[in-house]
Amino acid sequence: GNASFRSSTNKTPRLSESGEEGIEEWFELELKLVADVGIVGAPNAGKSTLLASLSNAKPKIANYPFTTLVPNLGVCDKLGYKSIVFADVPGLLEGAHTGVGLGQEFLRHCERCNVLVQVIDGDSPDPLGDFHAIRTELDLFSESLAAKDFIVAINKIDIPGVLDRTRDLQEYLTENGIELHTISAAARQGIDPLLKSVDSVLLRFTKEQEQEFGSTYGGFVEDGFGPPEDELDRASEYKKLKREADKATTRRDFSDFTLHFEGATRTWLVKGRAFESYVQMTDWQYYQAWQRFRKIIKVSGLYNALKRQGIKHGDTVCIGAQTFEWNNKMDHDLSYGEWKDYMDAETKKE
Protein backbone atom coordinates (compact mmCIF):
# COMPACT_ATOMS: atom_id res chain seq x y z
CA GLY A 1 0.00 0.00 0.00
CA ASN A 2 0.97 3.64 -0.34
CA ALA A 3 1.47 4.00 3.44
CA SER A 4 4.82 2.22 3.13
CA PHE A 5 6.11 5.01 0.83
CA ARG A 6 5.19 7.83 3.23
CA SER A 7 8.09 9.99 4.41
CA SER A 8 8.74 13.44 5.83
CA THR A 9 9.05 14.86 2.31
CA ASN A 10 6.25 12.79 0.79
CA LYS A 11 3.23 13.05 3.08
CA THR A 12 0.66 11.66 0.61
CA PRO A 13 2.47 9.29 -1.74
CA ARG A 14 0.56 8.54 -4.93
CA LEU A 15 2.18 5.18 -5.36
CA SER A 16 1.47 1.58 -4.36
CA GLU A 17 2.72 -1.88 -5.24
CA SER A 18 0.94 -5.07 -6.15
CA GLY A 19 1.67 -8.34 -4.35
CA GLU A 20 4.73 -10.26 -5.50
CA GLU A 21 4.04 -13.17 -7.80
CA GLY A 22 4.27 -16.48 -6.00
CA ILE A 23 6.54 -19.39 -6.87
CA GLU A 24 4.88 -22.14 -8.88
CA GLU A 25 6.01 -25.71 -8.34
CA TRP A 26 4.77 -29.18 -9.29
CA PHE A 27 4.68 -31.80 -6.55
CA GLU A 28 3.96 -35.50 -6.67
CA LEU A 29 2.19 -36.54 -3.48
CA GLU A 30 2.13 -40.16 -2.40
CA LEU A 31 -0.47 -41.40 0.07
CA LYS A 32 0.81 -43.92 2.59
CA LEU A 33 -1.27 -45.59 5.29
CA VAL A 34 -0.03 -45.00 8.81
CA ALA A 35 -0.09 -48.15 10.93
CA ASP A 36 1.96 -49.68 13.73
CA VAL A 37 2.17 -53.14 12.17
CA GLY A 38 2.07 -54.26 8.55
CA ILE A 39 0.86 -57.77 7.70
CA VAL A 40 2.62 -59.05 4.57
CA GLY A 41 2.79 -62.33 2.74
CA ALA A 42 1.99 -64.24 -0.42
CA PRO A 43 -1.58 -64.33 -1.80
CA ASN A 44 -4.03 -66.53 0.15
CA ALA A 45 -1.69 -66.82 3.16
CA GLY A 46 -4.46 -65.79 5.58
CA LYS A 47 -3.51 -62.14 6.17
CA SER A 48 -7.08 -60.82 6.11
CA THR A 49 -8.21 -63.61 8.40
CA LEU A 50 -5.45 -62.67 10.83
CA LEU A 51 -6.54 -59.03 10.73
CA ALA A 52 -10.12 -60.07 11.49
CA SER A 53 -8.88 -62.20 14.41
CA LEU A 54 -6.83 -59.34 15.85
CA SER A 55 -9.36 -56.55 15.43
CA ASN A 56 -12.98 -55.71 14.68
CA ALA A 57 -12.17 -55.10 11.01
CA LYS A 58 -14.33 -56.98 8.51
CA PRO A 59 -12.12 -57.50 5.44
CA LYS A 60 -13.30 -59.68 2.59
CA ILE A 61 -12.20 -63.27 3.24
CA ALA A 62 -12.37 -66.12 0.72
CA ASN A 63 -10.43 -69.24 -0.21
CA TYR A 64 -8.78 -67.88 -3.35
CA PRO A 65 -5.85 -65.55 -4.11
CA PHE A 66 -6.19 -61.73 -4.33
CA THR A 67 -9.31 -61.51 -2.20
CA THR A 68 -7.82 -58.28 -0.83
CA LEU A 69 -7.35 -55.65 -3.54
CA VAL A 70 -6.65 -52.62 -1.33
CA PRO A 71 -4.94 -52.38 2.07
CA ASN A 72 -7.22 -52.74 5.10
CA LEU A 73 -6.74 -51.20 8.53
CA GLY A 74 -7.82 -52.68 11.85
CA VAL A 75 -7.40 -51.45 15.43
CA CYS A 76 -6.56 -54.09 18.00
CA ASP A 77 -7.47 -53.27 21.62
CA LYS A 78 -7.17 -56.77 23.05
CA LEU A 79 -4.25 -55.74 25.29
CA GLY A 80 -6.55 -53.49 27.31
CA TYR A 81 -4.01 -50.75 28.15
CA LYS A 82 -3.23 -49.71 24.54
CA SER A 83 -4.37 -50.11 20.97
CA ILE A 84 -2.31 -51.23 17.97
CA VAL A 85 -3.14 -50.40 14.36
CA PHE A 86 -2.60 -53.25 11.89
CA ALA A 87 -2.47 -52.87 8.09
CA ASP A 88 -3.39 -55.88 5.95
CA VAL A 89 -1.37 -55.51 2.74
CA PRO A 90 -2.64 -57.38 -0.39
CA GLY A 91 -0.67 -60.45 -1.45
CA LEU A 92 2.76 -59.95 -2.98
CA LEU A 93 3.99 -61.72 -6.10
CA GLU A 94 7.49 -62.31 -7.39
CA GLY A 95 8.58 -59.05 -9.00
CA ALA A 96 6.33 -56.94 -6.75
CA HIS A 97 9.16 -54.40 -6.25
CA THR A 98 8.98 -53.61 -9.99
CA GLY A 99 5.20 -53.20 -9.94
CA VAL A 100 4.08 -56.74 -10.75
CA GLY A 101 0.59 -57.26 -9.32
CA LEU A 102 0.51 -53.63 -8.16
CA GLY A 103 3.31 -54.55 -5.76
CA GLN A 104 4.72 -51.02 -5.59
CA GLU A 105 1.28 -49.66 -4.74
CA PHE A 106 1.07 -52.08 -1.81
CA LEU A 107 4.64 -52.06 -0.53
CA ARG A 108 4.78 -48.29 -0.09
CA HIS A 109 2.11 -48.56 2.62
CA CYS A 110 4.49 -50.73 4.67
CA GLU A 111 7.14 -48.00 4.78
CA ARG A 112 5.27 -46.17 7.54
CA CYS A 113 4.83 -49.33 9.63
CA ASN A 114 7.21 -49.91 12.51
CA VAL A 115 6.98 -53.70 12.62
CA LEU A 116 6.07 -56.32 10.01
CA VAL A 117 4.32 -59.63 10.54
CA GLN A 118 5.13 -61.99 7.68
CA VAL A 119 2.39 -64.57 7.33
CA ILE A 120 3.40 -67.89 5.75
CA ASP A 121 0.82 -70.25 4.27
CA GLY A 122 1.61 -73.48 6.11
CA ASP A 123 -0.33 -75.43 3.47
CA SER A 124 1.85 -74.04 0.65
CA PRO A 125 3.94 -76.48 -1.44
CA ASP A 126 7.09 -74.52 -0.53
CA PRO A 127 6.77 -72.50 2.72
CA LEU A 128 10.52 -71.83 2.95
CA GLY A 129 10.56 -70.57 -0.65
CA ASP A 130 7.59 -68.28 0.10
CA PHE A 131 9.48 -66.82 3.04
CA HIS A 132 12.58 -66.05 0.96
CA ALA A 133 10.50 -64.69 -1.93
CA ILE A 134 8.77 -62.10 0.26
CA ARG A 135 12.02 -61.11 2.00
CA THR A 136 13.64 -60.63 -1.40
CA GLU A 137 10.82 -58.36 -2.62
CA LEU A 138 11.04 -56.23 0.52
CA ASP A 139 14.80 -55.91 0.16
CA LEU A 140 14.65 -54.99 -3.53
CA PHE A 141 11.87 -52.43 -2.98
CA SER A 142 13.56 -50.57 -0.12
CA GLU A 143 16.53 -51.26 2.12
CA SER A 144 14.83 -49.45 4.98
CA LEU A 145 11.74 -51.62 4.57
CA ALA A 146 13.79 -54.82 4.62
CA ALA A 147 15.62 -53.61 7.75
CA LYS A 148 12.42 -53.27 9.80
CA ASP A 149 11.86 -55.63 12.70
CA PHE A 150 9.63 -58.51 11.72
CA ILE A 151 7.96 -61.60 13.14
CA VAL A 152 7.08 -64.71 11.15
CA ALA A 153 3.70 -66.35 11.66
CA ILE A 154 3.16 -69.78 10.09
CA ASN A 155 -0.58 -69.94 9.51
CA LYS A 156 -3.12 -72.75 9.03
CA ILE A 157 -1.70 -75.13 11.66
CA ASP A 158 -5.24 -76.43 12.13
CA ILE A 159 -4.77 -78.32 8.85
CA PRO A 160 -3.30 -81.81 9.49
CA GLY A 161 0.37 -82.17 8.49
CA VAL A 162 1.17 -78.43 8.31
CA LEU A 163 3.63 -78.50 11.21
CA ASP A 164 5.50 -81.41 9.60
CA ARG A 165 5.59 -79.76 6.15
CA THR A 166 7.00 -76.55 7.62
CA ARG A 167 9.73 -78.27 9.62
CA ASP A 168 12.50 -76.99 7.32
CA LEU A 169 11.20 -73.42 7.61
CA GLN A 170 10.95 -73.66 11.39
CA GLU A 171 14.53 -74.91 11.66
CA TYR A 172 15.81 -72.19 9.33
CA LEU A 173 14.10 -69.42 11.31
CA THR A 174 15.32 -70.80 14.63
CA GLU A 175 18.92 -71.09 13.39
CA ASN A 176 18.86 -67.48 12.18
CA GLY A 177 17.33 -66.07 15.37
CA ILE A 178 14.06 -65.00 13.71
CA GLU A 179 11.05 -64.93 16.02
CA LEU A 180 8.49 -67.52 14.96
CA HIS A 181 4.88 -68.20 15.87
CA THR A 182 2.63 -71.00 14.66
CA ILE A 183 -0.98 -69.89 14.42
CA SER A 184 -4.36 -70.61 12.95
CA ALA A 185 -6.01 -67.29 12.18
CA ALA A 186 -9.30 -68.98 11.29
CA ALA A 187 -9.43 -71.03 14.54
CA ARG A 188 -7.85 -68.16 16.55
CA GLN A 189 -5.05 -70.43 17.79
CA GLY A 190 -1.79 -68.78 18.85
CA ILE A 191 -3.16 -65.26 18.33
CA ASP A 192 -2.56 -64.01 21.88
CA PRO A 193 1.15 -65.02 22.04
CA LEU A 194 1.67 -63.41 18.62
CA LEU A 195 0.03 -60.19 19.79
CA LYS A 196 2.17 -60.06 22.93
CA SER A 197 5.31 -60.51 20.81
CA VAL A 198 4.23 -57.70 18.48
CA ASP A 199 3.64 -55.43 21.47
CA SER A 200 7.08 -56.27 22.85
CA VAL A 201 8.78 -55.42 19.55
CA LEU A 202 6.82 -52.15 19.32
CA LEU A 203 7.92 -51.16 22.83
CA ARG A 204 11.55 -51.84 21.92
CA PHE A 205 11.14 -49.79 18.74
CA THR A 206 9.66 -46.85 20.68
CA LYS A 207 12.55 -46.85 23.18
CA GLU A 208 15.07 -46.84 20.32
CA GLN A 209 13.30 -43.87 18.74
CA GLU A 210 13.30 -41.97 22.04
CA GLN A 211 17.03 -42.53 22.45
CA GLU A 212 17.76 -41.38 18.90
CA PHE A 213 15.36 -38.45 18.50
CA GLY A 214 14.23 -37.52 22.02
CA SER A 215 10.95 -38.21 23.77
CA THR A 216 9.03 -35.37 22.10
CA TYR A 217 10.68 -35.19 18.71
CA GLY A 218 8.15 -33.69 16.29
CA GLY A 219 5.30 -35.60 17.89
CA PHE A 220 6.42 -38.74 16.06
CA VAL A 221 7.75 -40.81 18.94
CA GLU A 222 4.56 -40.64 20.99
CA ASP A 223 2.75 -42.09 18.00
CA GLY A 224 5.43 -44.71 17.51
CA PHE A 225 6.89 -43.25 14.31
CA GLY A 226 10.43 -42.07 13.80
CA PRO A 227 11.05 -39.71 10.87
CA PRO A 228 12.94 -41.39 8.00
CA GLU A 229 16.34 -39.89 7.23
CA ASP A 230 15.34 -38.87 3.69
CA GLU A 231 12.39 -36.88 5.09
CA LEU A 232 14.68 -35.09 7.54
CA ASP A 233 17.02 -34.19 4.66
CA ARG A 234 14.13 -32.87 2.55
CA ALA A 235 12.83 -30.80 5.48
CA SER A 236 16.27 -29.28 6.05
CA GLU A 237 16.65 -28.46 2.35
CA TYR A 238 13.20 -26.86 2.26
CA LYS A 239 14.02 -24.60 5.23
CA LYS A 240 17.27 -23.55 3.54
CA LEU A 241 15.50 -22.66 0.27
CA LYS A 242 12.80 -20.75 2.16
CA ARG A 243 15.40 -18.67 4.00
CA GLU A 244 17.11 -17.82 0.71
CA ALA A 245 13.79 -16.91 -0.93
CA ASP A 246 12.77 -14.70 2.01
CA LYS A 247 16.13 -12.96 1.94
CA ALA A 248 15.92 -12.32 -1.79
CA THR A 249 12.39 -10.95 -1.45
CA THR A 250 13.00 -8.61 1.47
CA ARG A 251 16.43 -7.39 0.37
CA ARG A 252 16.43 -6.41 -3.26
CA ASP A 253 19.89 -6.13 -4.78
CA PHE A 254 19.34 -4.10 -7.95
CA SER A 255 23.05 -4.19 -8.77
CA ASP A 256 22.80 -7.93 -9.46
CA PHE A 257 21.66 -8.07 -13.10
CA THR A 258 22.81 -9.26 -16.53
CA LEU A 259 22.27 -7.80 -19.99
CA HIS A 260 21.67 -9.58 -23.28
CA PHE A 261 21.30 -7.74 -26.61
CA GLU A 262 19.38 -9.13 -29.57
CA GLY A 263 20.67 -7.16 -32.54
CA ALA A 264 18.03 -8.28 -35.03
CA THR A 265 15.21 -6.64 -33.06
CA ARG A 266 17.27 -4.04 -31.15
CA THR A 267 16.02 -5.52 -27.88
CA TRP A 268 17.85 -5.43 -24.55
CA LEU A 269 16.97 -8.18 -22.07
CA VAL A 270 17.59 -7.37 -18.40
CA LYS A 271 17.80 -10.38 -16.08
CA GLY A 272 17.86 -10.05 -12.30
CA ARG A 273 15.57 -11.16 -9.48
CA ALA A 274 15.33 -7.69 -7.91
CA PHE A 275 14.46 -5.95 -11.19
CA GLU A 276 12.00 -8.63 -12.32
CA SER A 277 10.24 -8.58 -8.94
CA TYR A 278 10.14 -4.78 -8.97
CA VAL A 279 8.56 -4.35 -12.40
CA GLN A 280 6.03 -7.10 -11.65
CA MET A 281 4.90 -5.39 -8.44
CA THR A 282 4.87 -1.83 -9.79
CA ASP A 283 1.59 -0.24 -10.85
CA TRP A 284 2.67 1.75 -13.91
CA GLN A 285 -0.44 3.94 -13.99
CA TYR A 286 1.13 6.14 -11.30
CA TYR A 287 3.36 9.04 -12.29
CA GLN A 288 5.50 8.51 -9.18
CA ALA A 289 6.12 4.90 -10.24
CA TRP A 290 7.94 6.12 -13.34
CA GLN A 291 9.92 8.64 -11.34
CA ARG A 292 10.97 5.90 -8.96
CA PHE A 293 11.92 3.60 -11.83
CA ARG A 294 14.20 6.23 -13.37
CA LYS A 295 15.97 6.70 -10.04
CA ILE A 296 16.45 2.95 -9.60
CA ILE A 297 18.02 2.39 -13.04
CA LYS A 298 20.50 5.16 -12.25
CA VAL A 299 21.41 4.05 -8.73
CA SER A 300 21.68 0.37 -9.70
CA GLY A 301 24.06 1.09 -12.60
CA LEU A 302 21.67 -0.24 -15.24
CA TYR A 303 21.48 3.10 -17.01
CA ASN A 304 25.28 3.40 -17.32
CA ALA A 305 25.61 -0.26 -18.35
CA LEU A 306 23.13 0.23 -21.20
CA LYS A 307 24.82 3.42 -22.33
CA ARG A 308 28.26 1.78 -22.33
CA GLN A 309 27.00 -1.09 -24.48
CA GLY A 310 25.53 1.29 -27.04
CA ILE A 311 21.78 1.48 -26.48
CA LYS A 312 20.05 3.84 -28.91
CA HIS A 313 16.92 5.93 -28.90
CA GLY A 314 13.92 3.74 -29.82
CA ASP A 315 15.49 0.47 -28.66
CA THR A 316 13.30 -1.90 -26.63
CA VAL A 317 14.20 -2.81 -23.05
CA CYS A 318 12.61 -5.95 -21.55
CA ILE A 319 12.55 -6.62 -17.81
CA GLY A 320 10.50 -9.65 -16.98
CA ALA A 321 7.13 -9.28 -18.70
CA GLN A 322 7.46 -5.48 -18.92
CA THR A 323 8.79 -3.72 -22.06
CA PHE A 324 9.95 -0.11 -22.41
CA GLU A 325 10.99 2.03 -25.33
CA TRP A 326 14.29 3.73 -24.61
CA ASN A 327 14.53 7.46 -25.23
CA ASN A 328 17.24 10.04 -24.80
CA LYS A 329 15.48 11.59 -21.79
CA MET A 330 15.75 8.49 -19.59
CA ASP A 331 18.28 10.30 -17.40
CA HIS A 332 15.94 13.27 -16.88
CA ASP A 333 12.91 13.53 -14.61
CA LEU A 334 9.85 13.90 -16.80
CA SER A 335 7.26 16.48 -15.86
CA TYR A 336 3.75 15.21 -15.28
CA GLY A 337 2.70 16.58 -18.67
CA GLU A 338 5.57 14.85 -20.48
CA TRP A 339 4.80 11.58 -18.69
CA LYS A 340 1.10 11.89 -19.60
CA ASP A 341 1.96 12.42 -23.27
CA TYR A 342 4.28 9.40 -23.17
CA MET A 343 1.58 7.19 -21.60
CA ASP A 344 -0.99 8.35 -24.17
CA ALA A 345 1.40 7.47 -26.97
CA GLU A 346 2.02 4.02 -25.50
CA THR A 347 -1.72 3.44 -25.18
CA LYS A 348 -2.27 4.29 -28.83
CA LYS A 349 0.42 1.76 -29.85
CA GLU A 350 -1.44 -1.01 -28.01
Image: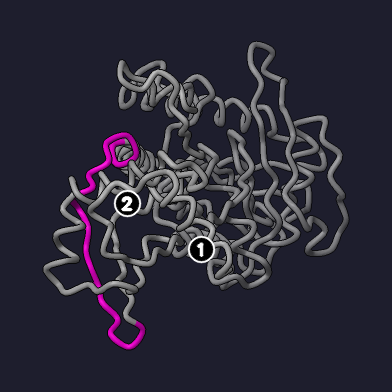
Q: Residue at x 31, y 20 (%)?
A: 9
Query: Residue 313 in the image: x percent, y percent?
Result: 29, 72
How many numbered marks appear? 2
Say what amino acid the circle numbered 1 marks. Glu
**Magenta residues, start to end:** 247-265
Of residues 182 and 185, the one drawn nearer to the viewer in this rendering? 185
Q: Which residue is mark 1?
A: 346
Q: Which residue is mark 2?
A: 275
Q: Which mark is residue 286?
A: none
- Taking 73 as reference, is 129 left or right? left
2 or 1: mark nearer the eye = 1
Does residue 25 lie above or below 152 as drawn?
below
**Is 320 in the magenta?**
no
Say what amino acid the circle numbered 2 marks. Phe
Q: Residue at x 50, y 19 (%)?
A: 222
**Is 251 in the magenta?**
yes
Q: Quadrant of residue 5?
A: top left
- Taking 249 as reference, is 182 left or right? right
Q: Residue at x 75, y 44 (%)?
A: 72
